[in-house]
Structure formats: structure tokens, C-alpha cells
Image (spheres, rainbow, N blue to C red):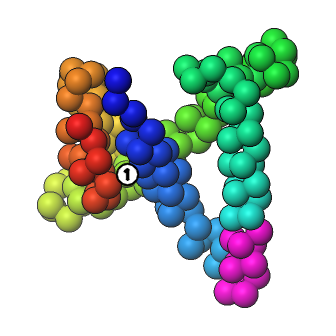
Amino acid sequence: MRSKVFGSTLIIAGTTIGAGMLALPLASSGIGFVPSVALMLAMWMLMSYTALLMLEVHQHAPQSATLGSLADQFLGKKGRYLAIAATLFLLYALCAAYIAGGGSQFHSKLASLSLPSLPTQTGTLLFTALVAGAVMLVPARSMSLTACCLSPKSSCLAFR
């Protein structure tokens, strides 16, 4: 069986970086350049530390372990539920960020086509329906191609 570690790493990094890039300039503009850089370095150190902790946990678990099974193994049932809730919250926040950012861009594109004045919610709803429809209609084996089409990143070359 071929390893999917590299492709999985790119998917996680692309998703995390993509959603963060939508909010970072606006969120850090109020505190200035030097505090923003210091805060980003502190967050980088924290993320590196937690990644090393996850690596340590994975060394004492089966290869097929998931975040939920790891939490169940080391933290019990309550830890599993907390890990699942945190993952669901992260996925909800990512969806909300992409829908808000993509919907406003889609609305501005519709407005530039000289269409009648549409409310902002229309662009957001159309964007959500188009992306959700594309994801639902594409077979699972073709999802890497869909990710390449929907993603502006050059990392799509890693997908099979």
C-alpha cells in the first residue's frame, strides 16, 4: 500500500493556510507590524510544539489510529467526545470562512457582469450551492481532480 502521508499533509496545510489567509491581514492590522510578527512567531512555536506532541502520541498508537481513537485511547470517552467536538468546530469554522470569503467574491463578480442589483446573500447562496453541488456530484475517486480545479495552489500536483 502506498503512503498517502505527503498528500494528506498538503491537504491539511492547504486548508489551514487558505482559511487563515482570509483573516490575517484584517485581524492583525490594528495592532501594528512588530506585534503582529511577534504574535505569529509565538503561534508558530505553539503549533510546532503541539505537532511534536501529536507525533509522540502517534508513536504509541496503531498506524491506522485516528484523532478520535487516539483521544479515546489516551483520554477516555470524554476526551474522544471533546476531540470530535473540536474537529467539528474546526470544520464548521473553515466552511464559514470559505463561504463568507468566496460568497462575497462571487457576489462582486456577479455585480461586475452588470446583472441587476442582487443582495449579497444571493452571491453567498449561489456560491455555496455551486461548490456543494460539485462536491456531491463528483465521484470520490475524482475528488483530487476536483481539489485541483477548486484550489489555486500548485500543491495539487501531489494528488493522484
Residue 93 visible somewhere in the drawing: yes
Q: Identify which residue, 1 or 103, lies in the foreground.
A: 1
> Measuring 38% from the left and 42% from the top, which residue is drawn there?
7
Q: Is residue 141 above or below residue 10?
A: above
Q: Identify which residue, 111 or 46, lies in the foreground.
A: 46
Q: Identify which residue, 156 or 119, lies in the foreground.
A: 156
| Residue 75: quarter of image | top right
* Residue 129 highlighted magenta (yes or no): no
User: In the image, residue 72 lies at what x, y percent?
Assistant: 76, 16
Q: Judging from the image, what secondary structure is the residue with disc 1 in?
A: helix
Give the prevailing secondary structure in the magenta stretch.
helix
* Residue 41 highlighted magenta (yes or no): yes
Q: Which portion, as a residue range, is magenta?
A: 30-42
Quadrant position of the C terminus in the picture: top left
**What residue did someone put label 1 on?**
102
Q: Is residue 55 above or below residue 112?
A: above
Q: Is residue 38 above or below residue 51?
A: below
Position of 101 with respect to 107 (left or right) is right
| Residue 41: quarter of image | bottom right
Residue 98 visible somewhere in the drawing: no
Amino acid under label 1?
Answer: Gly
Quadrant position of the N terminus in the picture: top left
Crowding near the residue tagged with mark 1, few <14, some 14–19, many ≥20 C-alpha atoms within 10 Å = some
> Measuring 75% from the left and 23% from the top, which residue is drawn there?
71
Position of 89 with respect to 118 (left or right) is right
User: In the image, residue 96 lies at what x, y percent?
Assistant: 52, 42
| Number of numbered discs overlaid on the protein picture | 1
Position of 131 with respect to 75 (left or right) is left
User: In the image, residue 125 lies at what x, y percent?
Assistant: 35, 37
> Measuring 69% from the left and 33% from the top, which residue is drawn there?
59
- Farthest top residue? 77
